[in-house]
């Protein structure tokens, strides 16, 4: 036992070690599979119900792509919970101290955590977005209603951007989790930004509601039709996605600054 | 009072190192021998290898100073006990050593470097600060796996350390279902994963049953016997007297003593001798004549202060007095600790009370 069991490498631990560790953590938590499973079921269910309902009512005058992607709004909620839990579960269980003892360089650790969270959520959300699209369009065309395909104008863009958008929501929630350090606080503030803020903004500054995540998702990113350029019109998909990236970046940056200097 | 602190060999093959501990000054260590400790593992290494050094370490929470200009050194090859009452700043100090908390001033270094600068933290330092620092839904094996990956430790080490702490049979079970004792073992397994030269344990026997306590004690002494630095905090004085060779004693975040267990006890008012004799009156008179203070206990035994056992024996031989029992009394670590920390604990209340009493008298 006194003999060193292995040679200590000359260099030091790097980002790839932290990434390998975070991937292992992500894959060994039952809650990962549970949340992602719930997300798949919720998204497909909402898409199914929305397109079914639209078809039932005649199916005229709506954006078929946007309708099929409705399920991704539900994915936005569970995706936010997923993102927040990736960091708050470490605080609630005390694992964060073991994590920091193993990887004390906090910027490197955070880069690994954010990178793994981003990669996992982008891949997952893109696949889910495609699944929602095909399910929704399948239901619509099954009812003889003009459906969209990936070749339709704006559809591929909407599907791909929606996936990225939900991943950004999850990253924003991760940032909020980093700030709050508690699951309850992170999810409450996430729900506040995504669901309550639009209501408040609608009352006090109606024109600015279009800059909020929920409205960007439904009216800018998921939609394919050109919605005009008036004072109340949605922002363009690209501007919308950039805004969402900005929100996620602000939450992550604020969380990172606190993470770097706070005691664990 | 215990008859002697080292009534039995405290650990396997470790007795010799206790005797080799260099004499230490009351306020700080004075290394006589640069090659000490005599461990092959560290003999040829730079002197700072495996040494934990705290220098003027200070941590404040608002108005409270949790750790107050703490300076001490923890050396390889022995178990160093970190002793202090609850809330005296032990855990805060350990968190600062592990880089989890940032000191307001001063430094805590391991081998001359702050924890954050270690090249392979888990291969250099193993820390058990919190028995439950794992996700309850993850299995013991999976918990150790991500730790191993973070420091590029071969994954076969996971099963090796699980075996070492006796958790192999439950390695696949959710760690959240573990008893406190099993959690402590998992925490200890995590510290051993990278085979580090420095180990820190914060209250490792808290909540353990006697068998678990015994296991931890032997384990810690075994690690030290291999030449590792073992720094273990406790508020359980009796446990430290069995486990530790050296002591860092703090109260209210301040250093009270940094010494060996032996010195700590003997300097804290030990040195009395218990004497059982049928010739009580004659013996007491002879002892008093030699300048000793003698008390007759309820059990009929004499407690002699001011003379050592050999001198008492010499007096018996000289005067032809009968001796049935002659036992040197070493103060227990607990007595020594209470004597030293009494001032720390009672300083303010007694001062206030004294001032009030003085005021009434005037």
Image (cartoon, rainbow, N blue to C red):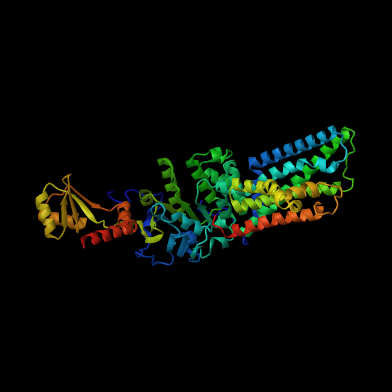
The residue located at (79%, 36%) in the rendering is A50
Where residue A175 sits in the image (x, y, percent)?
65, 53
Point out residue B92 in the picture as x, y percentages from the top left corner.
47, 56
Residue furthest front in the image: A204
Front residue of B36/A106: it is: A106
Residue at horizontal 60%, vertical 46%? A183
Q: Quadrant of residue B35?
A: bottom left
Query: As rendered, which of B151 and A247 lies closer to the eye?
Result: A247
Q: Nearer the viewer, residue A39 or B111?
A: A39
| Residue visible at 30% across and 56% down in the picture | B339
Quadrant, the C terminus of chain A? bottom right
Residue B138, compared with residue B266, is above or below; it is above
Give left or right: position of B285 versus A101.
Answer: left
What x and y, as percent, mark residue B108?
A: 49, 63
Q: Reply above or below: A63 against A15.
A: above
Residue A33: x percent and y percent?
A: 68, 40
Residue at 83% x, 39% y is: A134
Q: Quick check: can you spot residue B267?
A: no
Q: Is residue B295 left or right of residue B130?
A: left
């Amino acid at each position: 036992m006194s003999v060193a069991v292995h040679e200590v490498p000359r260099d030091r631990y790097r980002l790839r070690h932290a990434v390998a560790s975070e991937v292992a953590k992500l894959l060994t938590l039952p809650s990962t599979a549970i949340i992602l499973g719930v997300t798949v079921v919720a998204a497909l269910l909402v898409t199914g119900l929305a397109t079914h309902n639209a078809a039932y009512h005649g199916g005229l005058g709506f954006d078929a792509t946007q309708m099929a992607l409705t399920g991704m709004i539900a994915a936005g909620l569970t995706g936010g919970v997923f993102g927040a839990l990736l960091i708050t579960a470490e605080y609630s269980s005390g694992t964060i101290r073991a994590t920091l003892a193993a990887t004390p360089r906090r910027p490197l650790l955070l880069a690994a955590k954010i990178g793994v969270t981003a990669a996992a959520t982008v891949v997952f959300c893109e696949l889910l977005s495609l699944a929602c699209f095909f399910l929704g369009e399948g239901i619509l065309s099954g009812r003889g209603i003009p459906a969209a395909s990936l070749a339709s104008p704006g559809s591929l863009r909407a599907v791909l951007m929606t996936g990225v958008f939900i991943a950004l929501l999850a990253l924003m929630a991760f940032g909020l989790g980093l700030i709050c350090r508690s699951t309850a606080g992170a999810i409450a503030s996430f729900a506040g930004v995504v669901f309550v803020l639009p209501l408040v903004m609608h009352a006090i500054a109606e024109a600015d509601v279009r800059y909020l995540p929920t409205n960007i998702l439904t009216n800018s990113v998921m939609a394919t039709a050109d919605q005009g350029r008036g004072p109340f019109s949605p922002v363009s998909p690209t501007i919308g996605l950039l805004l969402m990236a900005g929100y996620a970046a602000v939450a992550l940056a604020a969380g990172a600054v606190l993470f770097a200097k706070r005691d664990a | 009072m215990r008859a002697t602190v080292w009534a039995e060999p405290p650990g396997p093959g470790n007795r010799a190192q206790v005797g080799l501990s260099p004499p230490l000054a009351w306020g700080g260590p004075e290394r006589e021998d640069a090659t000490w400790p005599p461990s092959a593992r560290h003999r040829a290494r730079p002197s700072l290898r495996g040494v934990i050094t705290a220098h003027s370490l200070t941590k404040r929470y608002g108005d409270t100073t949790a750790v107050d200009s703490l300076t001490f050194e923890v050396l390889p090859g022995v178990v160093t006990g970190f002793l202090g009452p609850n809330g005296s700043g032990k855990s805060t100090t350990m968190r600062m050593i592990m880089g989890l908390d940032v000191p307001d001033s001063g430094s805590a270094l391991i081998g001359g470097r702050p924890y954050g600068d270690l090249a392979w933290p888990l291969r250099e330092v193993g820390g058990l600060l919190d028995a439950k620092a794992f996700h309850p839904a993850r299995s013991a094996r999976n918990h150790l796996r991500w730790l191993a990956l973070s420091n590029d430790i071969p994954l076969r080490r996971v099963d090796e350390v699980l075996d070492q702490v006796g958790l192999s049979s439950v390695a696949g079970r959710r760690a959240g279902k573990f008893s406190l004792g099993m959690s402590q073992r998992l925490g200890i397994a995590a510290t051993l994963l990278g085979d580090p030269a420095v180990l820190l344990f914060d209250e490792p026997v808290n909540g353990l049953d006697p068998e678990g306590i015994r296991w931890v004690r032997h384990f810690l002494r075994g690690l030290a016997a291999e030449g590792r630095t073992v720094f273990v905090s406790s508020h359980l004085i009796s446990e430290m007297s069995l486990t530790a060779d050296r002591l860092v004693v703090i109260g209210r975040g301040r250093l009270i003593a940094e010494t060996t267990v032996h010195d700590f006890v003997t300097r804290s008012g030990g040195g009395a001798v218990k004497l059982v004799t049928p010739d009580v009156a004659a013996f007491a008179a002879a002892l008093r004549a030699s300048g000793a203070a003698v008390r007759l206990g309820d059990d009929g035994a004499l407690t002699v202060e001011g003379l050592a056992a050999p001198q008492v024996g010499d007096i018996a031989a000289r005067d032809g007095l009968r001796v049935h029992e002659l036992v040197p009394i070493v103060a227990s670590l607990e007595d020594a600790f209470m004597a030293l920390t009494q001032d720390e604990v009672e300083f303010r209340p007694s001062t206030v009370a004294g001032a009030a009493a003085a005021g009434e008298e005037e």
